[in-house]
Amino acid sequence: MNRQELLAVIADENRVITENIDEKYQSDVLGRIKGNAGAVVLPVSTEEVSRILNYANEKGIKVTPRGAGTNLVGSTVPTEGGIVLDLSRMNRVLEIDTDTLSAVVEPGVILEDFQKQVEELGLFYPPDPGEKIATIGGNISTNAGGMRAVKYGVTRDYVLGLEVVLADGEVVNLGSKNIKDSSGLSLKNLIIGSEGTLAVITKCILKLVPKPETTISAVAAFPSLKDGIENVLRIIQQNANPTALEFVERKVLQLGEDYLGIRFPYENAEAYIILTFDGNENEVRENAEKVGRLVKEQGALDYLILEDEKTRNDVWKLRGVLVKAVEAISEQEPVDIVVPIDKTAEYIQYVNQLEKELSVQIVSFGHAGDGNVHLCVVKGNRTEEQWKREKHKVMSLIYKKAYELGGLTSGEHGIGLSKKEYFLAETKDENLNVMRRVKRAFDEHCILNNHIAYNI
């Protein structure tokens, strides 16, 4: 990579790195898929991003946009070399507008920092993916979901507008602060979830809502996962309006307990549903108690409203740490398949049976309210050769079953490199061809993250 040419574009030698590039820029958060960046550039403005992309487009240099690097599927791995475009220094909250309930932020703003800032003003940004130190730009690029999706929806539902830079350096504004928009094609929504393949996000207009008055959490304990999932459907049909509706099995919680050294409040069950309710205090309490009566009538072993703050925090810590708990004992392959919610129990039962048949540990948990199943396929003591072969077999089977049930490759992590094979195998050719034509329209020379997703 020609350092002098890059310095002519970004006149700051501290923000152009061409030697001794940090390993974090060569991979994602798991560090298992490796790339080989020729340079790392850290822009601080839309104008700099525009100049970088114009330069790269003219030279035919590949560009990999990157935020905090917390992705789990290899979306930020520069396998074709080129420039890693690190947007983490574009991290300003430019505006919080209490009149229009909106905010304008740069893509490098950290999710948890932004949420804290708006909540101090009595406002609320609902998207709640598991990784709180991810950037807003990264969340938008994968259409991140999280635990609150069952009530509030996903990131897409809170993006009003975007400023983006196309591959040739052109700056385009998509969407606005207006709530309604039937004014032509929704180009904004093409960018959301595109994993950096169409354009680079440089500003985000986000929708906010009033901060809920109160929040209550509860745990329902069941003799089996099937019983728990069946109750999820009943809870939704009862219009109890939970904010979060998570499932986890006892054998999985044990990993979290061992990792954190804390205990779950009810140990004598095979499966649990963890719930949160938020909103008006009286309504929230009424809904939480209504769910308790419902699940007990339907065979729940117990139902606990978590009045104690420490117990409540411990429960959500355990739910949030499960992937890290698995990683602490072994390498694992993360999966975030989504199936129709009435097929969740059937799918998990299949996974548990597969675990026995193939003698491979598969940890399962996830978002019961929207059918988003998280799996960790655990390497254990297998050699690299065994792991490669057996992992591929397991992954092929679990994706095949999901598709048979009407599911999809990813609910919130994206496709990246690790899911590309399975996505391409199951996506219809006519759909892929449309995606490829859209890619070409935004990025004629295919310099932006072209190594993932579409196989152009």
Image (cartoon, grey):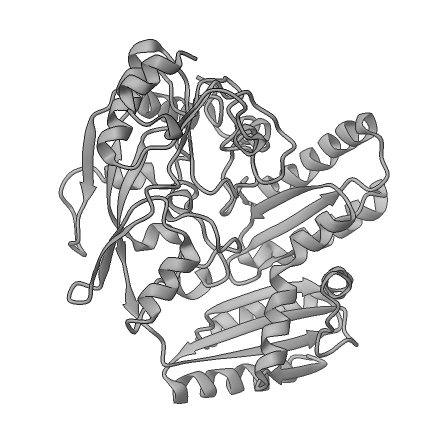
In the image: residue 58, left or right of residue 321: left
* Above or below for 330 versus 420: below
Question: Does residue 370 sit above or below 405 in this rendering?
Answer: below
Q: Is residue 229 visible?
A: no
- Residue 333 visible at all: yes
Residue drawn 37% across the image and 18% down it: 446
Picture residue at 28% right of the left edge, 63% below the top: 208
Question: How far from the left and from the top, in percent, is residue 211?
Answer: 33, 73
Residue 285 or residue 87, whichever sits in front: 87
Residue 230 is drawn in which quadrant? bottom right
x, y (%) of residue 43? 32, 33
| Total residue callouts | 0
In-image side of 239 versus 187 (left or right): right
Q: For the N terminus, give its image quadrant.
A: top left
29 relative to 209 in the view: left or right: right
Residue 290 picture location, percent across and down:
51, 85
Quarter of the picture containing the C terminus is top left
